[in-house]
């Protein structure tokens, strides 16, 4: 399995490369956004670890350029802890996951393993499951041709679940991705928003798109 590490800080890039090699990956490094684009287009990668802040073009632009030309290697974006808007932009242009700095290496390895298992496959910007369609760029949701208005959090939660169909996702993980890791409130907030989503996309259409996984969280079943 081959991984591309895109990080402009030499010391951190070398550490990332070394630790990933220790996990059994073949690893290449890139220090700039344009170098990353050239490398990703020249050779297929099973995963790309992409820092958001780069000296020439940022990680969002790198991701945008790769997706525009049909490069669908899974991308894990590294972002600052307070960069919520940047994470949203990254996911909107085709990044698959993100990890905030500073991070623990076991979590980095787990996320890379998950991306590698997913494999390289085209993931269109619009998420469609049956008659349910969600467009992250336009921030719209339609079911059976009817537009559905969701709150900001409901939209983000539904989008994250739809990006991981069939996967049971815990409440803590949903909070980390939708509310940001700094959220200190009750995990019941996830249940409240799931009820809101179900009341808008499922009950009026006699559907059951989001399944409760007892003791874990929720799973999107389409």
Image (cartoon, rainbow, N blue to C red):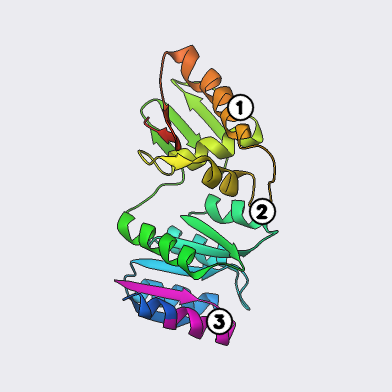
Left or right of residue 105: residue 82: right
Q: Which is more toward the observer, 42 or 110?
A: 110
At x 50% / y 22%, what residue is drawn?
A: 201
Q: Quadrant of the C terminus?
A: top left
What is the quadrant of residue 71 in the picture? bottom left
Q: Residue under label 1, please give it.
A: 192
Residue 8 locus on image (x, y percent) = 58, 81
Whole-number angstrom distance, CA of label 3 to CA of label 1: 40 Å
- Residue 189: say if magenta: no
Magenta range is 1-18
Q: Nearer the viewer, residue 193 or 138?
A: 193
Query: Quadrant where the N terminus lies?
Result: bottom left
SS at mark 2?
A: helix
Q: Which is more N-terminal, label 1 or label 3?
A: 3
Q: Is residue 74 above or below residue 28?
A: above
Residue 184 screen position, x and y as percent = 69, 45
Question: Residue 30, how many percent across, how many down?
Answer: 48, 81
Look at the numbered disc 1 and give the secondary structure of its residue. Answer: helix
Q: Nearer the viewer, residue 148 or 193?
A: 193
Contact check, label 2 and label 1, Cβ < 8 Å: no
Q: Which residue is mark 3?
A: 12
For this rendering, which residue is in front, 90 or 117?
117
């Amino acid at each position: 399995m081959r991984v591309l590490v895109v990080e402009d800080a030499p010391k951190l890039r070398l550490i990332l490369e070394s630790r990933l090699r220790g996990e059994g990956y073949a690893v290449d490094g890139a220090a700039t956004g344009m170098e990353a684009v050239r490398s990703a287009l020249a050779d297929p990668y099973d995963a790309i670890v992409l820092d958001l802040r780069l000296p020439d073009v940022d990680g969002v632009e790198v991701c945008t350029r790769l997706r525009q030309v049909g490069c669908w290697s899974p991308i894990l974006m590294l972002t600052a802890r307070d960069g919520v808007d940047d994470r949203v932009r990254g996911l909107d242009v085709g990044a698959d996951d993100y990890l905030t700095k500073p991070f623990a290496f076991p979590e980095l390895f787990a996320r890379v393993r998950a991306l590698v298992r997913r494999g390289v496959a085209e993931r269109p910007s619009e998420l469609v499951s049956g008659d349910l369609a969600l467009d992250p760029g336009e921030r719209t949701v339609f079911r059976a041709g009817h537009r559905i208005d969701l709150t900001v959090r409901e939209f983000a939660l539904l989008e994250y679940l739809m990006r991981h169909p069939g996967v049971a996702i815990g409440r803590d993980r949903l909070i980390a991705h939708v509310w940001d890791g700094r959220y200190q409130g009750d995990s019941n907030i996830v249940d409240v928003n799931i009820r809101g989503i179900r009341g808008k996309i499922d009950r009026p259409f006699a559907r059951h798109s989001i399944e409760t996984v007892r003791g874990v969280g929720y799973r999107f079943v389409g």
